[in-house]
Image (cartoon, coloured by chain):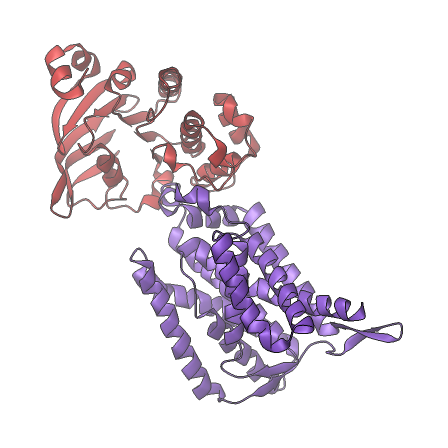
Chain colours: A purple, B red
Amino acid sequence: MQQLVNTLLGGLTLGMVYAAFALALVLIWRSTRIVNFAQAPMAMVTTFVALRIIEGGHSYWLGFAAALVAGLVLGAVVERVLIRPVEGKAEINAVILTLGLFIVLHALAAVVFGNRYRSFPAAFGIRGIEVGDTTIALTGFGIFTIVAVLVVMGLLVLLFRFTDLGLRMRAAAFNQEVARLLGVRVGRMLTLGWALASLVGSLAGLLIAGGSLVHPGYMDAVVVYGFVAAVLGGLDSPAGAVVGGLLLGLSLSLVSGYVGSQLVALAALAILMAVLLLRPQGLFSQARERRV
Amino acid sequence: MLEVRELSTSYGAVRALQEVTFTAPRGEVTAVLGANGAGKTTLLRTITGLVRAQSGSASYDGRELTRTAPELMPGLGIAHVPEGRGVITELTVEENLRLGGLGRGGRVRPEELERIYELFPALADRRAALAHVLSGGERQMLVLGRALMAEPTVLLLDEPSLGLAPRIVAQLFELLQSLVVEQGLTVLLVEQNARSALSIAHRGVVLSLGRVVVDERADVLAGDDQLRHAYLGF
């Protein structure tokens, strides 16, 4: 029983991070039909920005905030400089550009920050909380992870559902031409969408790094899990990304706890294949209506 | 007054519009008629800048439109209403309407929405529904209502009767006519349904293979058997 609770708690924390990462992928896919393969190294670079600031003697929170701002800026710059020129051409062009950016950011990070493992601090304790006389697998930092992702998702929901800006952003994502005729500055909305997605990706990067080791490739496995989570939920649906992330986190944690931790990556791929075979549009996608 | 002067454009080697010239006077409905592929939709898209004009101009009260970005059109009082497919199906009915109001700049007040719901009671019952559940007629009402939210002075309507039952078309055109009379709108009405369009239009411009072949008063055009048979097929 205790093992099950611990496995589920671990899965919940991990699932929240996958959810955030999947959400970053979905925000971009929904507006530009591009899977941003560079999401992981973009998040990695911003985590290193945070590490620089923290190692420079500043507080963890300053580094945390700086990484999020760096994510916002990096996302906007990537969209403006790299993606905008191939906008309206075949989507494969943009996808290959993001793959190229993946390689370039990796190499640059290795040059600038060094290609070795370094420990990244955590804002809260990374020991299990004690309930009575047993220790459960939920750490202070784990709680912070869950709360941080929930807060960011809540803010995104508020933005998209209840503000004029959010309405414009959704219009630009769903139908660029109609949105333009209604006066929406579609270009700006796409830039903002990339910026927000990149910020959410940076948050995921910081949460994975907390109390752990970082190096230029530390996010690469997460992009796979984030992608599986996004496909699971339906690449079109932010709510689906969150549910997909949680389902994936819980499933992988159960596999790791009861079958064997070496099978986690294999299990993720098995889930991806099963989804693509049984329900390729994902659990929450509206894609069928959109294809008509 | 909307003035189109020697407007030309092409898709690759195909000349889609060839020196199209006509005027749509203020407070009147000008019908743009012609067969499929005559260039009617291209004409609207070129006026609002979605398609680049190769030469010529389209201006409203002296302001050049073809070289102005489409997203600036609502601010100039120009509403381009695409076919019913132009509803954003992933948004609710009310969100579609709000979006129309945002185009004018500033916030959308509740009474503006209520005004549209009074015009189109069918939309009021479905304000919270996603637009993809709407019928064809309701979608046309939604795109028209959305355009009116921006309080335009010029309406460019692309095939508002497409796919609608004759009874609904009659209702829609009746409403359109009353809007023109009450608000002094300038309307460019692109239609395949020539008979209905001419019934509310003041002038009729007939396009054929991208050229203006007839520019005539609507009642004259509707009454001339030769013109009707030659170009309008009724």
Determine the residue positioned at 43% across, 65% down.
A36
- Of the 4 image quadrants, the one containing the N terminus of chain B is top left
Q: Looking at the picture, does residue B57 appear above or below residue A198? A: above
Q: Quadrant of residue B184?
A: top left
Residue B185 vs residue B94, the one in the foreground: B94
Determine the residue positioned at 30% across, 26% down.
B187
Determine the residue positioned at 39% across, 64% down.
A79
Q: Looking at the picture, does residue A237 appear above or below residue B173? A: below
Q: Total number of numbered labels?
A: 0
User: Residue B109 vs residue A96: left or right?
Assistant: right
- Of the 4 image quadrants, the one containing the C terminus of chain B is top left
Q: Quadrant of residue B211?
A: top left
User: Residue A225 vs residue A105: left or right?
Assistant: right
The image shows residue A32 at horizontal and vertical percentages of: 40, 56
Can I make out residue A251 in this image? yes
Can I make out residue A196 in this image? no
The image shows residue B11 at horizontal and vertical percentages of: 17, 45
Q: Quadrant of residue A142?
A: bottom right
Residue projecting furthest to the right: A132
Determine the residue positioned at 48% across, 63% down.
A195
Q: Looking at the picture, does residue A63 appear above or below residue B221? A: below
The image shows residue A151 at horizontal and vertical percentages of: 65, 60
Residue projecting furthest to the front: A259
User: Residue A146 vs residue B54: left or right?
Assistant: right
The image shows residue A252 at horizontal and vertical percentages of: 62, 68
Q: Looking at the picture, does residue A119 appear above or below residue B30? A: below
